Image (cartoon, rainbow, N blue to C red):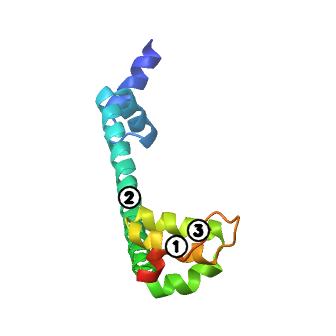
Amino acid sequence: MRALKRLTSTFRNRTTMPAEHSRLRRLMNPWGVMRAHRDTTVVALTIAADIVGTLEAELYALRSAADDLVDLLDDGMLASGVAEHLNCGEVERLANFLKAHDELRAAELWLECHAESDDEGDSHYKGETSQLALTA
């Protein structure tokens, strides 16, 4: 028992504590645990905010590029010259992209221009020249 009293009095009389002892003391203290949790949360939220900021910039760049592409594809001359060289799957993907950007008229234009070059049995074949392609 005396040895324990001498050991505790040694720690009480020291003005500086070893780093391990202060960390242990902080972790054993409920307020220290809350402080450590708060500090960890602040670090995690800071990292998350940095990630969100980076992704936001990348998303803005992608949206801007997609809007530029939609403006480029909303052209009847381009559609009539290129759509006949695309296969059905490619023109469907292009039309879905335009529909996703609320360009329904441009999507239908690409499908109609493609349908003019389709043969019987192809999924977009209509038989006659479409009216939408003639008015564009």
**Residue for point 42% across, 79% down:** 74
Amino acid marked by disc 3? Lys
For residue 52, the mark is 2
- At which x and y percent is residue 54? 40, 65
Mark 1 and mark 2 lie on one chain; the one further toward the N terminus is 2
Residue 75 shows up from this direction: no
Q: Quadrant of the C terminus?
A: bottom left
Q: Nearer the viewer, residue 62 or 45?
A: 62
For residue 126, the mark is 3
Mark 2 closeness class: few <14, some 14–19, many ≥20 residues within 10 Å = few
Q: Is residue 58 left or right of residue 115?
A: left
Amino acid marked by disc 2? Val
Please determine whether, in this image, residue 136 is positioned above or below residue 122.
below
- Under circle 1, the secondary element is helix
- Residue under pointer 1: 112
Q: Quadrant of the N terminus?
A: top left
**Residue for point 52% across, 73% down:** 112
Q: Disc 1 and disc 3: Cα gap in Å?
A: 9 Å
Mark 1 and mark 3 lie on one chain; the one further toward the N terminus is 1
